[in-house]
Image: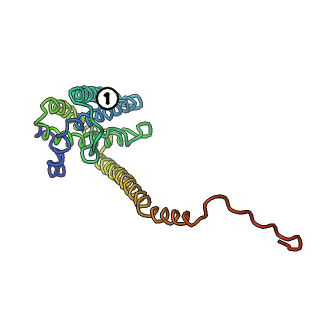
Amino acid sequence: MDEVVGPSALDRALRPLHRWVWRDPHRRARKLLRFAETEADGGRDLSRAAELTPDPLLRRLYLRHAEDELRHAALFRERGGALLRGLPRAPAGFEANWLTPGERGLDDLRVDGERDESLLAFLHLSEKAAAQRFAIYRQVLAHDPATRAVFDDVLHDEAFHMTYTQTQLARVAAGGSRARLFRARAGRLWKAYLRVAAALASVVGTLLLRIQYFVVLPPFALLARRAAKREPAGFMAARRPSPLTSQY
């Protein structure tokens, strides 16, 4: 399997981190269940793409792809549920989703507004990235043969998805497949940047709010407490009435 689809150079360099992420059984189970949701969403979007395409061959391939995605969802859901049933209850911990994402599917693409060329280019890059991620997950799961077998099964389908999307893109794009892949890759990089920027903004915003709460507000609270101590207790005496000869 590694000869057909191997992990990327970055994932190979981060192998110790991937191994650490997948070592915790609770986190492993939660990630598998999240993968199941993503695969199921991708299957529904591919079914919609099969309805919209005028190409009969692509319609059959999209439907085959959708069936594979739904089967993957069932595999991930079954294995994740089996792991959780054999573990004691534990609070949700650090997921590291940015480090070990699953297949993003079509969550970044509006199927109704895309032509077959752009959809195939996006699918090819998405399936290739997912296959490379699943390959590294498979390698670091030697201590969990059952979960590793799930990724083995999924990787066979991912290799087929990579092949058919590339072949059909070359057929449909009529010589413009490289340009389509370049646009799709640029779009994925831009959306990845937006996700990172949003996550960074959330972290910075949380940090600034905590600084305001623990650093800026305490001096004002202390000054307000001191001012309150100088105030006389009880009711204040009423002000004497002004004489009628005064304009005030």
Q: Residue 143: name its quadrant.
A: top left
Q: Nearer the viewer, residue 169 or 25?
A: 25
For the N terminus, which image quadrant? Answer: top left
Image point 13% across, 33% down: which residue? 144
Q: Nearer the viewer, residue 78 or 3?
A: 78
What x and y, as percent, mark residue 83?
Answer: 21, 29
Compared to 209, does 27 lie above or below? above
Q: Residue 82: name its quadrant.
A: top left
Give the amino acid type for the residue marked by disc 1 in the picture: Ala
Image point 44% across, 40% down: which residue? 113
What x and y, as percent, mark residue 181?
Answer: 30, 47
What x and y, as percent, mark residue 215?
Answer: 41, 63
Q: Residue 130: name its quadrant.
A: top left
For the C terminus, which image quadrant? Answer: bottom right
Compared to 69, does 196 lie above or below? below
What kind of colouring is applied to the model shown?
rainbow
Q: Identify the element where label 1 is drawn.
A: helix
Compared to 147, does 16 lie above or below? below
Q: Which residue is mark 1?
A: 66
Compared to 186, does 170 lie above or below? above
Image point 55% across, 63% down: which residue? 228
